[in-house]
Amino acid sequence: MTNAHKPANPDPSQYQNQLDQKLLAIKKQFGGLALPKIETFTSAPLHYRLRCEFKIWHEQGQASYAMYHPGEYKKPYIIEDFKVASELINALMPPLLSAINASDVLKRRLFSVEFLTTLSGEALITLLYHRPLDTIWEAEATALIQLLGADIIGRSRKQKVVLTRDYVSETLHVDGKDYYYQQIETSFTQPNGRVNKKMLSWALEHSRLCRGDLLELYCGNGNFTVPLAQNFDRVLATEIAKISVNSARFNLQKNGVNNVELVRMSSEEITQALNKVRPFRRLKYIDVDSYQFSTVFVDPPRAGLDDGTLDLLQRFKNIIYISCNPVTLHDNLVVLNNDYSIGHFAIFDQFPYTPHLECGVVLNRR
């Protein structure tokens, strides 16, 4: 492949302009709803992504980091540095690539590298291969751990080799308090750690006067659950992904949070349980009827909320909605707008220089 090295780094002088354009798009998109003044939370213009993935391109015996332009999947372009990624990722990229190119064992049939880092300075690197990994690879990768000071995982088809651990530990300082999180390699974590802290602070502020009990759907690894629990008497939190449930349990215990019941259920299942459609063994030891819910917190996937979950939300006095997709958020708010007023609306620039935008909404029953 003869492919010129293309720039992978944005121009930070254009950051505010791109955010202004996204804010204008939001105002236009939600123009039919009565919005309060939109709170805007910015990102750092560079070094904001705590995780990223690179293709490994092999040419003339050398491996290089590479990426694709959207829609162009035949001609990757070489990455020499990646300034949207954290400083730690940028520091690890050159010595890792040098070590890969110096070792046929590490380089052979390597097709991708994933980085996961934290604001508190930990790093986990996953090397993905189109071949089985043996003890020779393990020895080379163990030496790489010593060289880089980062944990290494090897993956190939139906194989996962964990040499030390498969997670990083994060500490987030929010509103004068530290919160501790285990972030597992394959589970979802917020990619922009500094903006995540702003989201947590915003959610804490706007739930402080809600009182009563909280129902949280799509709780993930407990990112919001851990800090929000202090604002409520009790919390019932649900999550369907097993790996996230296990991580959330760990994070609740690590932070000394003892007023949360966590169950592995989908939003559809908890809706059925609360509607008494059918019993669930997973709720056998939880007296759901004893909860005095005042508030529901949702952070759904890009598809937004299904009709049944939307109906469920309308039982609550307060709704706190975090959305990664303004399109489905708008559709859901149109339904909820009949009975709720929008008390607060915020945008969080999790993904600078892209069309994507995270939103936060607080709704109160009219």
Image (tube, rainbow, N blue to C red):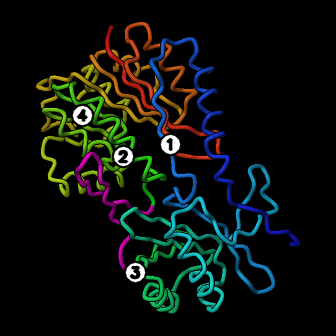
Q: Which disc, if any, is residue 163?
A: 3
Gap between marks 4 and 1 measured at Cα: 42 Å
Q: Are marks 3 and 2 in contact (CB under 8 Å)?
A: no
The quarter of the picture where the C terminus appears is: top left
- Nearest to N terminus: mark 1 or mark 3: 1
Q: Are marks 1 and 3 in contact (CB under 8 Å)?
A: no
Q: What's the amino acid at mark 4? A: Phe
Q: What's the amino acid at mark 1? A: Thr
- Tell me the element at label 3: loop
The residue carrying mark 1 is 42
Q: What's the amino acid at mark 3? A: Leu
Q: Which one is closest to the eye, mark 2 or mark 1?
A: 1
Give x and y (percent) for residue 208.
22, 30
- Nearest to N terminus: mark 3 or mark 2: 3
Q: Is residue 153 magenta?
A: no
Q: Which disc, if any, is residue 280?
A: 4
- Nearest to N terminus: mark 2 or mark 1: 1
Q: Are marks 4 and 1 in contact (CB under 8 Å)?
A: no
Q: Is residue 47 found left or right of 2 in the rendered image?
A: left
Q: Which span is picked out in magenta?
A: 163-185
Q: Residues within 10 Å of mark 1 (few under 14, many from 20)?
A: some
Is 12 above or below relative to 129?
Answer: above
Q: What's the amino acid at mark 2? A: Gly
Q: Which disc, if any, is residue 158?
A: none
Q: Which one is closest to the eye, mark 3 or mark 4?
A: 3
- Tell me the element at label 1: loop
Give x and y (percent) for residue 140.
51, 90
Gap between marks 2 and 1 measured at Cα: 24 Å
Q: Is residue 138 found left or right of 320 in the rendered image?
A: right
Gap between marks 3 and 2 measured at Cα: 25 Å
Q: Which disc, if any, is residue 220?
A: 2
Q: Magenta region's main secondary structure? A: strand
